[in-house]
Image (cartoon, rainbow, N blue to C red):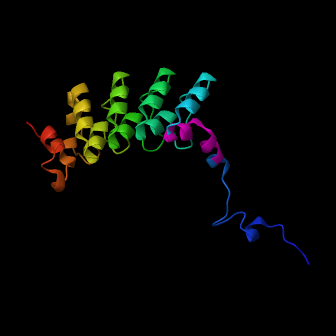
Amino acid sequence: VEMSHDCSEHGGGGVGGIFQTLEELDFDRGPWTIASNGDYPSIMKYLNKGGEPNLRDSAGYTALHYSARNGHENISRALVDHGAHVNAQTKAGLSTPLHRAALNGCHLVVKLLLDNNADVCMQDSDGKTALHKAVEGNWPEVCKLLIAHEPKCTEISDKNLKLPRNLTHDDVDHSEVYKLLNWR
């Protein structure tokens, strides 16, 4: 009986197989997973051993993008304290940690980033600012923080020529976000 050593015949690869690409393994072992999962002791160990706070994954995201998106204020603070760039942009989408935090309503992280000179007026590849993202997510507290920090962000149009106040939907027209942006 001849035995095949082709892994694809035994479920070791291909569709449904259990394997990770080198890129996936790097991601799992890098600071991005630690930051995304909110593992404070591990991020401190990484940083205290001289780990690079601005290391990017294959899409250009830093650990700060992941911690900001998930609302991990303590990890975001540790990264910023160790030199993470608050205005780092991803490769294709040009998203910043502030965009990610604003979209997900992570107001403590938004405040931290603003306190560390995050640029409220930076636009992503769609021309959207963090305020556009906060409006899309219907996060009034985040909108208030952003507007208080930089009032002119209310007048920046995206690539579709929409101001943040133009993004409110019919079902939220009476929301606090709508009232906040259309007070004039």
Residue at the spot x=38%, y=43% of the render? 125
Residue 124: x and y in percent read 37, 40
| Nearer to me, 75 or 22 | 75
Q: Is residue 136 above or below residue 3?
A: above
Residue 36: x and y in percent read 50, 41
Quadrant location of residue 89?
top left
Residue at the spot x=25%, y=30% of the render? 145
Residue that protrudes farthest toward the left in the picture: 184
Count of picture labels: 0
Quadrant location of residue 146?
top left
Tell me, yes or no, whether the highlighted magenta stretch contains residue 55.
Answer: no
Quadrant location of residue 28?
top right
The prevailing secondary structure element of the residues shown in magenta is helix
| Nearer to me, 46 or 164 | 46
User: Horizontally, is 153 left or right of 100 in the view?
Assistant: left
Residue at the spot x=64%, y=42% of the render? 26
Tell me, yes or no, whether the highlighted magenta stretch contains residue 30.
Answer: yes
Q: In this view, does 28 lie above or below 53?
A: below
Which image quarter is the N terminus in?
bottom right
Residue that protrudes farthest toward the front in the picture: 41
Which image quarter is the C terminus in?
top left
Which region shows up in magenta? 25-37
Residue 177: x and y in percent read 18, 42
User: Horizontally, is 170 left or right of 47 in the view?
Assistant: left
